[in-house]
Amino acid sequence: MKTNVKLLVSNHVARKIAQLHHPALSQALTAFTNMSQLKEAHALIIVSGLAHRVFTITRLLACAAIPHSGDIAYAKTLFHHVQTPTLFMYNTMMRAFSQSNEPLECVVMLYVHMLRAGILPDNFTFPFLIRSSSSALLLGQQLHAHITKFGLHCDVFVVNNTIGMYSSCGELNCARRLFDESWSLVDVVSWTTLITGHCSLGESEVARQFFDRMPCKNIVSWNAMISGYVHSGKIEEARKLFDEMPERDAASWSAMISGYSQGGMCREALGLFKQMVGAMVVPNEPALVSAVSACAQLRALEEGIWLHGYIEHHKFEINVTLGTVLLDMYGKCGNVEKALQVFNCMPEKNVFSWNSMIVAFAFNGCGRQALSLFWQMHTVGPPPNGVSFIAVLTGCSHSGLVDEGRWIFNLMTQEYQIKPQMEHYGCMVDLLGRAGLIKEALEFVEGMPMEPHPGLWGALVGACRIHGEVELGKQLGRHLINMEPHHGGRYALLSNIFAAANRWDDMAMVRNMLKERKVFKTAGNSIVKT
């Protein structure tokens, strides 16, 4: 009968010690839900004199080294107190290192220490090592040599991980050579790993050749090929393959929905998501994120509200990624109240969450709220980045908060040491231009350390038209036309200045210039959003 874990952490010490001798100790240790319980069990093990037992410490170490619920620092301490670690203990620590943010040197030194202790690796050792070196080709090659040296090149588990390492490093020739050399061993995982490797390099056609040659495909293989087409922008090929699948799982639907959403085919993304729900397939997080993102791109508030309701009704966890895309959707659809509601209910927020909420305020005419939220971010949130400053400067510009905008720009350059990009200068020019501070805006542009984008000059010319600065607008407009003589929109800017001032002769002159140069008036893009 399984040991009652609660008894191990709550009854009298003597009884706890007695229960530690129970054969089900291993089950009891793995049933602990947090490190505080595990540490108490460790204390009991020491008090009871069981700390010298290899089996007991091995199970304790395995529990402490679990990536999400364990404590790798505690596991390292446990390991270093073992006089003669076993191969299983070394493998346990290598697995923990490979699944954590520990430096690559840690797992390498552990492997070296193991060899020096006279312990030979097995078929579990190298996969952990190889996963740690997935982006370190030289180390991966050295490990491959050790695999051959220790006679583990005939283990398909080891071979597949080595193929994956070469693929991750972009060495597809080496991966394929190993695949061919291991022909008698290769399985569906081997084939799928090669397909994924070619897809990651944008070689979807080569990947398709391997896919078609596969003697036996599973759902993971199909998903890998569909994802490869999606990442290469070949949405039609992906959909054709999707329709041919003998069976689909959530990842299959998600890959296709994501492809539609990222490719701007948002109606198709939402339609496929509804088909997924109708097929009684439970969406995964990427599918939900892609569907909500499609609503944001379409500004489809009604469908976005339906999706949000679906998420809440089915009790999906609204984590930082899903929460951020939801509030972004509400912001783009103009429902700032709902965006703020989502933001406030998020248990965890990152810089993207804060930026999305500031953007929602900024682009919906809530400049002071954007400024207030930015101040919260500055004082208690994550450090703002360049996008944060673009967002709050946009809010200041749209709400006429000139002094606040100047302060924000100085805060960015002086306190956060963020080098202004063209977009930041564009926000400041827009801010000053809207406020009628044309000369200050001009000085700002002329003082830039980089060549101003024509869009900045265009914003200045537009500000001159709004505020009646005809002569300065004429001067800047001519300069802009000289910069882009074949851009019809630049002539239109200057023509509009003259029209606003009732200078019809000058306006006619600009239009004649447009005809003589055979320039067509086309809509242009600006880095300054108005």
Image (tube, rainbow, N blue to C red):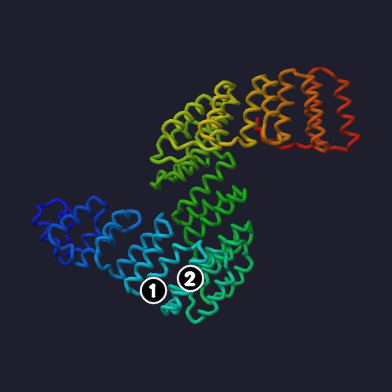
Q: Position of residue 279 (x, y in %)?
A: 48, 57
Horizontal side of 70 relative to 420 (left or right) equals left
Residue for point 16% across, 65% down: 1
Q: Amino acid at mark 1?
A: Asn
Q: Residue 508, position in %: x, y? A: 88, 25
- Please give the name of the residue rendered at 44% of the width and 36% of the height, measured from the top-left corner: 343
Residue type indicated by callout 2: Gln
To which quarter of the image does residue 488 belong?
top right
The reply to whether residue 422 is visible in this rendering is: yes
Q: Is residue 385 left or right of residue 232?
A: left
Foreground of the two, 448 or 349: 448
Within the image, what quadrant is residue 62 found in? bottom left
Under circle 2, the secondary element is: helix
Question: Can you see residue 332?
Answer: no
Whether residue 257 is situated above or below residue 183 in the rendered picture? above
Of the pair 445 and 380, the residue shown nearer to us: 445
- Judged from this view, the residue extending furthest toward the front is 116
Dot 2: within a 10 Å radius of its alpha carbon, few (fewer than 14), some, or many (20 or more) residues?
few
* Mark 1, other Cα within 10 Å: few <14 / some 14–19 / many ≥20: some
Instruction: Look at mark 2 in the image and give the residue it sits on.
Output: 142
According to the image, label 1 marks what residue? 123
Cα separation between marks 1 and 2: 16 Å
